[in-house]
Amino acid sequence: MSKLDYVQLSKTISHALRHAPWLYELELDEEGWTPVAALLIGLRNHRPSWRDMTEADLRAMMARPGKQRFELREGHIRALYGHSSNIPIEKVPMVPPARLYHGTAPRTATIIIREGLKPMNRQYVHLSADKGTAYEVGRRKAPKPVILVIDAAGAHAAGNDFYHGNEMIWLADQIPPAFIHQTEPSEP
């Protein structure tokens, strides 16, 4: 397919697999997988200019530099994280790194430190593997975000489950306040 806008394609697939699969006539299994063929039909119906899209186009989009958002396996595709739909996506618990990070707005940081991290409108809490990623995520919420340090090893030892999203993102059901600490405000 020529002149394919990979950014728009990625956003549309994110919408389809994370937020509104029913709009694309997709059914996700308990782990979030759907057949690639079904996704391609849904995308073609959504945007007629994509009528010639193939699995190769999906692979080319996924091969581009940046965040790895999707996974392809045996003719199926799924979003790795970010789900907000009511379809529960089950993840396999894993041992997290000792520390993880969460970037947020200063006004929200105060609430998080007091009440803990909760998934809000998503199925899981999103955590960053490093301060730089947390800073970039936090900048979506405030020009000078606060970076919270998560004692992931302590939270895991206390019985909180963690799930691997991709090389930069970890997920958790929640993080109690005892395992959240604020860093000094600064850029990474």
Image (cartoon, grey):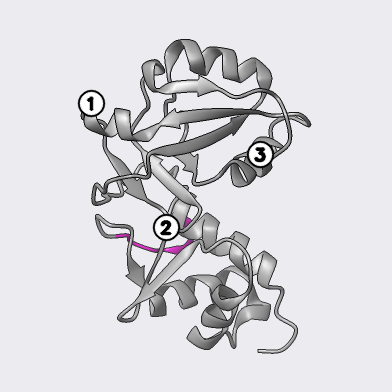
What's the distance in space between the residues labelled 3 and 2, CA to CA? 21 Å
Task: Give whichever of discs 3 and 2 has the lower sequence position.
Answer: 2
Magenta stretch holds residue 27: yes
How many marks overall?
Answer: 3
Q: Residue furthest top?
A: 114
Task: Give whichever of discs 1 and 2 has the lower sequence position.
Answer: 2
Would you say the residues marked 3 and 2 are in contact, meaning their CB atoms lie under 8 Å apart? no
Label 3 crowding class (10 Å Cα cut-off): few <14, some 14-19, many 20+?
many
Q: State left or right for residue 8 relative to residue 46.
A: right
Q: Amino acid at mark 1?
A: Ala
Residue 87 on image: x %, y %? 32, 47
Name the residue that disc number 3 marks.
135
Q: Residue at x 49, y 59 (%)?
A: 16
Q: Name above or below for residue 79 compared with residue 55.
A: above
SS of the residue under disc 2: loop
Residue 90 on image: x %, y %? 26, 49
Name the residue that disc number 2 marks.
80
Q: Residue at x 48, y 84 (%)?
A: 55
Name the residue that disc number 1 marks.
158
SS of the residue under disc 1: loop
Quadrant of the image containing the N terminus: bottom right
Q: Nearer the viewer, residue 107 or 89?
A: 107
Task: Give whichever of discs 1 and 3 has the lower sequence position.
Answer: 3
Would you say the residues marked 1 and 3 are in contact, meaning their CB atoms lie under 8 Å apart? no
Q: Amino acid at mark 3?
A: Tyr
Which range of residues does the magenta coloring cover? 21-28
SS of the residue under disc 3: helix
